[in-house]
Image (tube, coloured by chain):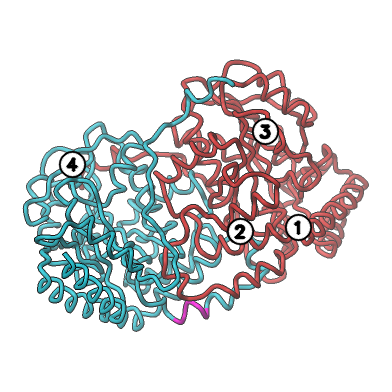
Chain colours: A cyan, B red
Amino acid sequence: MGNWEENVRKVVPYVPGEQPNKPGMIKLNTNENPYPPSPAVMKALGEIRADGLRRYPDPSSKILIDAIAESYGIDPNQVFVGVGSDDVLAMTFMTFFNSNRPVLFPDITYSFYDVWADLLRIPYEIQALDEQFCICKEDYKKKNGGVIFPNPNAPTGVLLELGDIEEIIQANRDVVVVIDEAYIDFGGESALPLIEKYDNLLVVQTFSKSRALAGMRIGCAFGQPMLIKYLNDVKYSFNSYTMDETALAIGAAAVRDKAYYKETVKKIVATREWVKKELREMGFVFEDSMSNFIFAAHTSVRAQYILEELRKNNIYVRHFHKPIRISNYLRITIGTDDEMKKFLKTLKNILEKR
Amino acid sequence: MGNWEENVRKVVPYVPGEQPNKPGMIKLNTNENPYPPSPAVMKALGEIRADGLRRYPDPSSKILIDAIAESYGIDPNQVFVGVGSDDVLAMTFMTFFNSNRPVLFPDITYSFYDVWADLLRIPYEIQALDEQFCICKEDYKKKNGGVIFPNPNAPTGVLLELGDIEEIIQANRDVVVVIDEAYIDFGGESALPLIEKYDNLLVVQTFSKSRALAGMRIGCAFGQPMLIKYLNDVKYSFNSYTMDETALAIGAAAVRDKAYYKETVKKIVATREWVKKELREMGFVFEDSMSNFIFAAHTSVRAQYILEELRKNNIYVRHFHKPIRISNYLRITIGTDDEMKKFLKTLKNILEKR
């Protein structure tokens, strides 16, 4: 055995969240959409022909990018697509965060940011959220190598107002500012219109949540053409053909069906607001969530205990051990009304048993 | 406008090969399989349910990895999968080529190797093929940071014997040696059995050629579990969910249908051998190809001229301007018998017109 291991890029292995697949389970742990994707998606899938699969897909992803551009009322050259927003974000870190100065992001945030930074040897500095889990905009006005945060933030669900976001962008014209809007469709105001004004703003979105297509791995980014070009230059040098034939067809069909998407989102928001009331009555505390999940702690019962008891009832929610100040919180995805009724009923039993 | 462009990772943009989509065209330019994928693939696609698309796919890609492992008679922990072999190779460069010493690969080879090296700031040193476009094994016995080459080589189609490959691996036990077997199924002997013997050998394959699934972006790598683990550690830190629901199902179905795959490959090989004879009779010269393409130069007519004339007849072949010593060669993918008859007839006309 030789010394080849010496030259291996060693990383602390990132462990993806659990993806249980049990019959009858209520899966509220990974913020998936409880409703199926648009019926147009299955129609598009049915139109795939064997002969289309043997050929390379269009590397420019034109049908998908055109559908997104049309749906959002922007130019196709303002749109980038990738294999889920994780791929888009990985490309973003690789393309734009090449400074010796640290990239800034919150202490409580999407758990992948520091993983990408570590993998790509990018310096970073975390900025603590305030007591209400809110991003302090002043923290992002120091010299840095880039700024990234989700809005609404994850796993807190807390939304930052667009005015505050614009202030952060204005204070950072020498770096790229990335707003990760995975959950924006559930009640927030998108920073998308700001791309016309700021050439250093990249807005990232995903088809995994509001479009109900987590299984298809489709993410996108919006920015001025120069920003998108830089992203594409790196992407084409990494993997030219990322989006497969089915993802292109399905993604385009999904984004074109605006009515279905709006209806689904409306249902999830209504369920969320109702669940919020129920949780408060049961003694949970949480900041107001504008996403498709609620990040809550019980005033007297430990999160870990609740998690385990729920699991015994085939109900899955998410728990983060780090950082310590969120270790008593559970992130609960909003399911269907029926799922949430069962969840709340089980939860009530668990709390009463204590 | 700020100075954000200063921190952009600038690369010479890689331009993917042309993907024309003209009615009635004969597409012999990107080494796609002229036959559709296994009927089992369309069956698997038909079984996809809308509800499966809203959930995240299995990040461990179990159904696909198990199918591959079973089909190749190896352990699932010896298999890695990615979004085409390009994704697998990009992850490979990122994971294993972290030395200050140069990675070695041929001067005439897959045009993406130097692109990845440049993108990831990996030093490399190209090794010239001999006059017969053959890899000189002695060139790969110097100190280096890793070795990679396709076998058969692309775009030459020339195969290196397994004994020579083993000699190269033996001389490089301190680095990872990657054999890129995109075209191995068309007549070469795979280095796969050697993974049992050498812990520093990674064998990369693709579903884009012999499995007729270029449109689905599926690639894989084989190696000892430790090598696969390192690759997965980086992959999970880059994008945990790369393989979408349809790619997993389709890939598994394709690899399980061995009979169909063997039959298709046999047909392509038979066509190739017949086309070789015809081309020689027309005055083309080429080294013997063991892939699904022929890399040929005409003794008196310029490649560029032939390419353009073929194009006027809606027939596409591939031409590489660099390096200069292959600038008079055309890479001709093997199509169906019918396509190749039309191609040869048109070619004859073009040559006679001169």
Label 1 neighbour load within 10 Å: few <14, some 14-19, many 20+: some
Q: Are marks 3 and 4 in contact (CB under 8 Å)?
A: no
Residue B76 located left or right of residue B120: right
| Helix, strand or loop for disc 2 | loop
Pinpoint residue B269: horizontal percent, then vertical percent. 84, 51
Which amino acid type is marked by label 2? Tyr
Q: CA distance from mark 2 to mark 1?
A: 22 Å
Q: Are marks 2 and 3 on the same chain?
A: no
Q: CA distance from mark 4 to mark 1?
A: 52 Å
Which amino acid type is marked by label 3? Glu
Where on the picture, by quarter, is residue B341? bottom right
Earlier sequence position, callout 2 versus callout 4: 2
Name the front one of labels 3 and 4. Answer: 3
Which amino acid type is marked by label 1? Lys
Chain letter belonging to callout 2: A
Q: Are marks 3 and 4 on the same chain?
A: no
Q: CA distance from mark 2 to mark 3?
A: 33 Å
Earlier sequence position, callout 1 versus callout 3: 3
Q: Which residues are magenta?
A: A39-43
> Residue tagged by mark 3?
B196
User: Magenta stretch: dominant SS?
Assistant: helix
Which numbered circle lies on residue B258? 1
Magenta stretch encompasses residue B217: no
Pinpoint residue B209: horizontal percent, then vertical percent. 69, 53
Chain letter belonging to callout 1: B
